[in-house]
Amino acid sequence: MSARKPGTPSSALVTSGLVELAAGALSGWVYTATRMGVGAGTVDSKRIRQWHLDLIMMGTATVAAGLAAPDASKLARTALGVGAWTNAMAFLPLAFSDDLRRPRPSSWLPSARSWPLRWDSPGWRSERSAPVAERPLRSHSGD
């Protein structure tokens, strides 16, 4: 990893994260407006809060990742940048549509179906599925 020289431009990932962080700061005004009753009945302030906080959290994580791994592959940088924005912005439509807020099997069924696959994975089975008598003993005495 090479150190960045002073005065050189920052990576696109860091820039994207900073813009997302700024958007999160500005979205605080939108959240404040919904809490004060602007758009009452048409806007779900809890979803606006989720959007606001997710913009801030994902922006911060993107900046941190861009600074921690400036030589990451283009695929990794692109996936992180697109995923950070997509994840945060997914909350915004939910704030305006009652229909989107209703839980449907189509939204939770794929996740529920994937749980048995996770439980059957070798990492999950290793120690957790062994009978109690076969599990390794753990010492709590500090030995």
Image (spheres, rainbow, N blue to C red):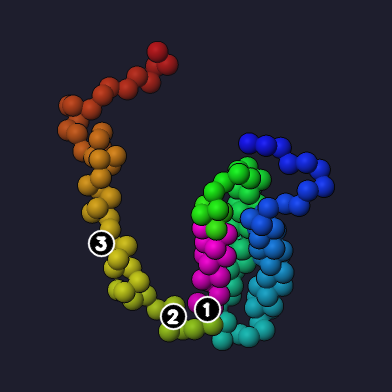
Q: Quadrant of the C terminus?
A: top left
Question: Residue under circle 3?
Answer: 113
- Three-letter code for the amino acid on which mark 3 is drawn: Arg
**Is residue 21 visible from the viewing direction of this image?**
no
Q: Residue at x 42, y 16 (%)?
A: 142
Left or right, residue 137 beside residue 43: left
Question: Residue under circle 2?
Answer: 100
Is residue 55 shown in magenta? no
Disc on the earlier residue, 3 or 1: 1
Residue numbers of the magenta segment:
79-95
Q: Quadrant of the N terminus?
A: top right
How much space separates mark 3 and mark 1, taking CA atoms?
A: 26 Å
Mark 1 crowd level (few <14, some 14–19, many ≥20, 10 Å Cα): some
Question: Residue under circle 1?
Answer: 93
Q: Residue at x 65, y 78 (%)?
A: 34
Disc on the earlier residue, 3 or 2: 2
Q: Residue at x 46, y 84 (%)?
A: 98
Q: Is residue 98 shown above or below 64?
A: below
Rendered location of residue 65, percent (x, y) = 60, 48
How much space separates mark 3 and mark 2, taking CA atoms?
A: 21 Å
- Three-letter code for the amino acid on which mark 1 is drawn: Pro
Mark 3 crowd level (few <14, some 14–19, many ≥20, 10 Å Cα): few
Task: Determine the main secondary structure of the stretch shown in magenta.
Answer: helix
Tell me if label 1 and label 2 are in contact, CB under 8 Å.
yes
Q: Residue at x 61, y 63 (%)?
A: 55
Is residue 94 shown in magenta? yes
**Is residue 24 visible from the viewing direction of this image?**
yes
- Three-letter code for the amino acid on which mark 2 is drawn: Leu
How much space separates mark 1 and mark 2, taking CA atoms?
A: 8 Å
